[in-house]
Image (cartoon, rainbow, N blue to C red):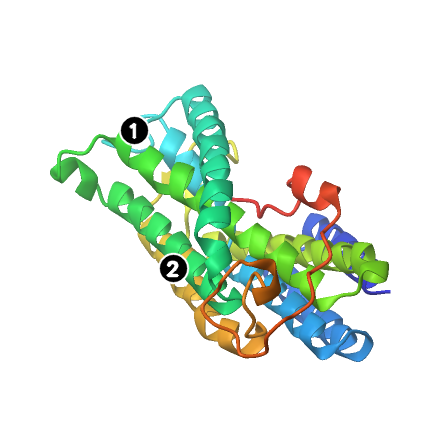
Amino acid sequence: MMGIASGIAALGLAIVGATSSPFCQLVYSACVAAFVAALAFALLAKEQATSNLYFFISVCLYVQIPGAIDFWYTADPACVPNGPNFGFTYYQTVSRLVGSLAMGLGLVIFHTVVTKWRFRKAFWMMTIVRIVASCVDLLIIERVNIKMGVPDKAAFVLGDAMILNLASMLDIMPGILMLSRLTSPSVATSSYAVLQSFMNFGQNASLALGVWLIEVLGIKTGSDGSGECDFRNLTYLVLVAHIILPAMCIPLTFLLIPDMPIMPPSSGGGGDGDESGGSPQPPQPPAAAVVSGSMEPII
C-alpha cells in the first residue's frame, strides 16, 4: 500500500512538473509528502514510519540543483569568465570515475569504522560530510581555491566528485541495515520497497524544490536558447540548497532515527555501547538492494 501510494505520488509529480510552474510542483510535493507521511504512521510500526520519514526528508532537503551547478562548471568563458570552464566530457568522466572509487572507499570505511557507531551518529556524521563537500563547491565558485593556489580540477576532485559520493555510500549502508533490524525476514523485501519509494519521491520533490530555487534566484544558464547567462546568485543557491537545508537533518536524526548500535553486541561489531545486551542477529537485506545501487541519491 505504501509503495503504491509513493509511486502514484511520484507519477503525479512528473505530470504536474510537465504541465505547471515550479511553484505548483513545490506545493504539490509538500501536500503529497504530508499525506504519504500520515499514511506511513497509520500503516507501519512507529520506528519504521519515523525512519522512512527521515530518509524522505534527508533526500528532499539535499536539494538537487544540477541544472545550475553542471552548467556553471562546464560553461565557456563567454558565459562564466574566469570560471573552471571544464569540458563536458572531462566533467562527466571524472565525476563518474572518481565517484566510483569513492563509493568503493565508502564500503571499506563502513565495514572498518562506521559499523562501530550507532545509527544516529552515522547519519548526522554523513550529513556533515555532505555539507563539507558543498563548502568546497562554494570555494570554487568564489574562486578562493585559485587564490590559495589550488587548481579547479584538483579542488573539484576533492569536493563533490569524491566526498559527496563517499557520503552517499556511507548513508545508504546504515539505512539498509537499520531497516533489516526493524523488520522481520518475512516482510523485509516489502520494507525495502517502501524505503526505495520514499527515497525516490524525496528525490523528485528535491528536484522540484531545486527548480523553484533556481527560478527565484534568477539564475540563467543559457540552456533555454536565449544564450543569457547569470550565475551571480549561485553562491546563495548552493548555500541554501546544500548547506542550510541539509543541516536541518542533523536534529532530525535524534527525533526520527532509533538509538541503536549498527551492529548488535551478539554480532561482535562492538558499537558505541548498548545496554540492551544480546540483540538477535539482523536479517540480511536482499542482494539487489545493495548491488543495484538504486538507493543512491541523485547528486
Is residue 24 positioned above or below 75 on the image?
below
The circle on residue 102 is: none
Residue 70 % position (x, y): 44, 36
Q: Could you tell me if the residues under marks 2 and 1 are in contact, i.e. CB atoms within 8 Å? A: no
Instruction: Indicate the position of residue 89 as horizontal and vertical percent values.
Output: 46, 20
Residue tagged 1: 153
Tell whether 86 sits left or right of 104: left
The residue sitting at 77% across, 60% down in the picture is 191
Q: Amino acid at mark 2?
A: Ile
Instruction: Determine crowd level at label 2: few under 14, some 14-19, many 20+ residues with C-alpha closer than 10 A.
Output: some
From this view, report whether residue 106 is shown above or below residue 89.
below
Which element carries disc 1, helix, strand or loop?
helix
Crowding at mark 1 (Cα within 10 Å: few <14, some 14-19, many 20+): some
**Can you give x and y, in whole percent of width and height, for residue 172 in the image?**
58, 51
Q: Nearer the viewer, residue 87 or 26?
A: 87
Q: Residue at x 50, y 68 (%)?
A: 120
Q: Is residue 205 visible?
A: no
Report the residue at 53% width, 54% height from top: 171
Q: Position of residue 291 (x, y in %)?
A: 67, 38
When asked about the image quadrant of residue 50, the answer is bottom right
Residue type of the residue flagged with mark 1: Lys
Q: Nearer the viewer, residue 213 or 102?
A: 102
Mark 2 → mark 1, Cα distance in angstroms: 23 Å
* Of labels 2 and 1, the one closer to you: 2
User: In the rendered image, which residue does mark 2 sit on?
Assistant: 128
Q: Is residue 245 visible?
A: yes
Q: Is residue 278 above or below residue 24?
A: below
Does 52 sit left or right of 227 as displayed?
A: right
Looking at marks 2 and 1 on the same chain, the residue that comes earlier in the sequence is marked by 2
How many discs mark residues in the rendered view? 2
Front-most of residues 62 and 103: 103
